Structures are given as C-alpha cells and as structure tokens.
Image (cartoon, grey):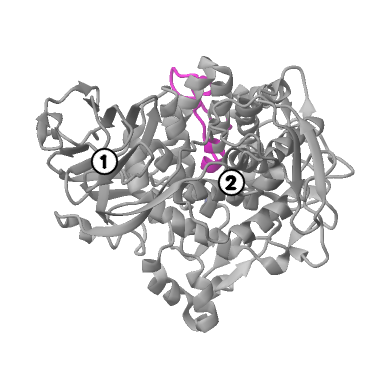
Amino acid sequence: MNIGCARYSRLKQRVVVFATFVCVCQGLNATDKGLNAADKGLNQPAVSGRYYEVVVPDTLDLAERAKMGLQYFIDIIREDYNYEMPLIIAFDPGHKGPAMKMHGNSLGACQCKAAETMAYLRLMTGSKVGLEREEKMLDMMVSMFGEDGLHWVAGSPDKPWLNIPEPFVMVHGQGRMLRAMIAWYQYTENSVWLEKTDGLIQGIDKIVEHKDDYAYFPVFGRYKGDYLRSCYVKAGWGDTVEPTHEKFGEEGSLFNHQGHVPGAIATSFLLSRNDKALRLSRELTHFLTKPKFWADWKNGEYPEIVGAEHAHWNGHWYGHINTLRAILDYAVATNDTRLMLFAREGYEWARRKRLARIGYFGSQGCAGGRIIGLAVKLSYHGIGDYWEDVDQYIRNHGVEMQIVPDDFDHMCRLAAENLNDETKKLLARNFGGYAGRLNKNCTWLCCAPHGNMGLFYAWDAALRYDHGTVRVNLLLNRASPWLDVDSYLPYEGKIVLKNKQAKEAFVRIPLWVDASLVQAKIGNRQVQNAWFDRYLRFEGLGPDDIVTIEFPLVEKTETWRVKDHVKETVYTLRMKGNTLVEISPPLHPCLYGRRGKYLANEAPMRKVTRYVSEKVLQW
Ligand SMILES: [Zn+2]
C-alpha cells in the first residue's frame, strides 16, 4: 500500500509537515486509505465501531475495567505541566501522600507505556472520554522527536524532576515509544505514526554499539544516579564498554533497561517490512541471547542441564519477562524456531516463581500484565498452549491489583491525617490504575500501563475470528462484531454465545471442567459434543443462533508452598473453577477480601453498553 503524501496538522502550532514515504502494510484492515493524515488526527479511529445496550451477567468484564483504566490515564495528564503524567501517586503520609509525584522516568519511559495502553483501551471500549486531552498529550509526545529520529526529553528549569539539565534520551523509552506508535498507527492508520517509527529506528541504529553480529546500548552516559547514568546526551555516551553480565544496568538489570527494544523493532517490521529494522532487531536479539546473560550469573548451573540453553535465569523478574517477549517478537517476525523454543522455556521458568496459580509473581501490579502478554503471544503462535494459565492470571491477580471504587475506604484509611476534600478527589482519580505494591498504597505509571495492557491482551485473546470461524479461548464476557460471549462464571457453569457472523465456533473448556459432563445446545436443540482437545466445536451456525454450554462448577481447596528470599509460606486457596475465592494467609489484608460473593450460585445480571469494532491490532 502506498500511503503517499501525508499531511499532518499540529493542533497548536498549526504547522503542516509534509512527509512522503512508502510502506507495505500487512494484516491491516485499512478502510479509508484515501483520507489524508490531517483528517485522521493522532487518535481518531480508522474504523468506526458500533454501540448497543444489552443485559449480561455481572461477572468479570474486561471492557468495563478498561473504561476505568482509560479514565485513569486521562485524569492524570497534567495540563499544567504540558501534558506530562506523574510517575507515582502516593496515598499515605509516609510517602508524602496523597500526592502526585513527577519524575524523569515518566516522560522518558513510562508515559510512552501509558500512551500505548490508551490505544488498546480505546479499541476495547469505544470510549470518547478525554479525546481532546489525549490528542494534545500525543501531540506533545510527537513533538519530542529530534532530527536524528530519537525521542528526546528536553531539560527544563521548570521541571526539576527531570534531573538532567540538558536534553536526554532514555533507552527504555525508545522501545516504549516504538510500541506506542505501532499501536496508534494501526488504530488510526495515520501515517505520521509509521513515519516517526521509521525515524526512531534509524536513530537507535546510530547510537547502539555494533559488533560482529550483535549490537547493544551502552549503559554509561554522562550523569550519575539511578536511571540517569544510562541516558544518552548530545555529547554521546560516557563509556561504550560491553556489559559483561545481566546485572549491568538500571535497577540492577540490563534486561529491564534495554531488553524490550528489539521486540518493538521486530513488530514494526511486520507493518513496515523495513529490512533495516529487522537487521537491527536481529543484532540486539543476538546480544540479549548471549549465554553470559542466562542461567545463574554467579556461574551456578543445574545438574545435567545447560541452563543458558534453556532460558534459565535468576534476577529481575520484570526485566526478564520483557526480554523474553522481545526475543519472542523477533522469533515470530523471522520464524526462528530456535528462539521461539527459547522464549517458551524462559516463560515456563518464569512462572515457577511465587504463585502462578493465581498470577501472583511479584509485589508490583505490572507483573500480571507482562506475563499475560508473553503467554498469549506464545499461544497465538502455537509455541505453547497457555490458555489455562492466562485464565488463571486474568481472573485473579491480573485484575486484583487494579484500584477500583471498592478500594476507596482502604485508600482513605491510608491517607490518615492527610485526608481532606482535596486529597479525597486525588485518591478517586486512581480508580483504574494499578497498584505499585501489594498494600495498594500507590499507583505507578510503570504498573498502570502494564496492568491495563494485561486486560487488553486477555480481551484480545478471549475471542478470535478468521474467515467465518470464531475461537473462544477464554470463557469471559466478550463482545465482538462476530459473536458475543456471556459468561456466568464463577457463579454458574454456563456460557452463552450470541452469534452474529460466525459459521463455526470452537470454544475452549477449562481444565477443571469434567468434559463428560458438558452439555450444549443451539437454540433449544441439544447437540452432540464434538471435541478437539479442549475445544468444543459448533458448526453450521446461522446469524442470531444462541449456543448455550453448561457444566457443573467445581469448588476445590489447594495448598501451594511459596518461597521468597527469607521464608517459605504455605498458602491455602479456595478456588471456584479458576477464580480464587479465599486465600489463607492473605497476600495482604487489602487483597481478595471481597470475593465471598462468588460463592453464590446464581449470577447477577446488569445492563451495559457494548462497543464492537472490526479492527484487530498486532502487538
Ligand atoms: Zn510496575
């Protein structure tokens, strides 16, 4: 597709930038290729969706949670700071809360994650809240690009939190901004996003150190201090020495600091088919998969196992998940089986930590979303079958760490003597964000994007459509242009499919269900079950057909031993299907305390507004 001459009108400056470039786009449903970029705006959807009201079971609804998430991001944009977002909103006086805390990591890195997430949440919800404010924020972020293509944070005497008194480039943010632009490009089909993506990749190519068949970002810039030392400035790097082990970066992790970048570059290749992008992604991936970074960095090994061959690792959990995802993104873009298997083994190694049964891997609210993305992508490409894992993660810790109105009393208690009318309003603006710690005493711009991305990944995964066939991978409420799913879990073992366009449907039944007890009907007609591993197949579907699937709910109590640095704890979990109802001892008193309602055996109903769009995003 030749997008040709794209015009993009900046809102404030009314500057018209002419950019001509050619790209080959694959996997996109472009419907209005004739429109120029100025008509599209930075955040206008290329494909309009449809809204309708319907009564559905009042059970886990990712689109409804996404509405809260989007509201959170819109609400925390600081117009008084030129549309910058705070990095932390602390609730308790011990952390000087309730207060917003600005930080250079926001504009340099985490706000880019938020921008990416906002595109996903728009697609899930069709929400029109804060569109103008969001566009001004995106416009500000686009204005940060330098002539070299890099995403620069300008130092400002009015923003002491930026800490570096000159323009700087955060390595982490370069990959994050790439991902944001890949999402917004697909959502809007505005060629400006792809043009900037291409420019940023060229910029990255010039500041990495190229060696034989690999490349890396140096970790020493010109400034000292956490997050500052790895920033690139106009005078270049301070030292380009090659990192010798994985602990050679910010937060004691090379992977956390730069590991995700080749993934974003590889995904951009799927849209642009830019061979230079693929070459750079390959070089960075070769570096990240060097054996010196894997297994135990203190030279430990495992009996009769070469740990580095099997993506064993020991260290920064979040950074390793990001890096495994990047390796997977590159492997998918190049159909590299060896690296696909590496990513799979790394994922399985990662889920041994803490309590994968409920998606609890660490104290931060971003953990669930990160691993959900990895598990879904591995499953999409047939590298593993992790739908059961994803169901367990998203029903539990993947949503439990989101701040919701029911947390308000807890937040007010935390605010203690600092609670007043003003701080109450600030606390309420956190609904939809994700907590930075298990005690829910703050939201972080690290965790809120990843947590909400987890909602999107699971929502995207729950139902897929291709040429008349729907695959329902997760038994969650999910609306789509092709078929709607109403889930009565975990109150009742009942799923209702309301067909629209599908001729055939495959529905995955979770492991805890006894397959011999599943009954299905189309309309009032009982149908013979046709099983394809865990999938039930329904064929010959007509528009408006209603498929009802019923099975007995299973309630079980399980114990799991969990180790951290200091102790081992035995947890007792009361599970209804894959939904945690009670946990003892509690992970924290503010978590999982409101789930007694799931013990009822009839699902409450409620009226909601559904939004459906034909647009599917590659991520
Ligand atoms: Zn986080």
Q: Which residues are magenta?
A: 296-321
Determine which residue is flagged by label 1.
Answer: 498
Instruction: Check the picture and name the quadrant holding the N terminus.
Output: top right
Q: Residue at x 49, y 46 (%)?
A: 123
Dot 2 falls on a residue whose secondary structure is: helix
**Is residue 112 or residue 559 the one in the foreground?**
112
The amino acid type of the residue labelled 2 equals Glu
Q: Measured along the vertical axis of the image, is residue 162 above or below residue 347?
A: below
- The verdict on residue 494 being magenta is no
Q: Is residue 365 left or right of residue 561?
A: right
**Mark 2 to mark 1: distance in Å?**
31 Å
User: Is residue 299 visible to the viewer in this orientation of the structure?
Assistant: no
Query: Whole-percent x and y of residue 415?
Result: 49, 76
**Is residue 594 or residue 96 the one in the foreground?**
594
Instruction: Check the picture and name the quadrant holding the C terminus.
Output: top right
**Is residue 595 or residue 63 the one in the foreground?**
63
Query: Whole-percent x and y of residue 396?
Result: 34, 49
Question: Tag on residue 116?
Answer: 2
Q: Residue at x 40, y 42 (%)?
A: 459
The single residue placed furthest to the front in the displayed view is 34
Q: Residue at x 38, y 55 (%)?
A: 400
Q: Is residue 466 left or right of residue 86?
A: left
Query: Whole-percent x and y of residue 548?
Result: 17, 39
Q: Quadrant of residue 327?
A: top right
Q: Is residue 607 left or right of residue 252?
A: left
Question: Tag on residue 613?
Answer: none
Dot 1 falls on a residue whose secondary structure is: strand
Q: Local crowd at mark 1 within 10 Å, few (<14), some, or many (≥20)?
A: some
Magenta stretch, overall SS: loop
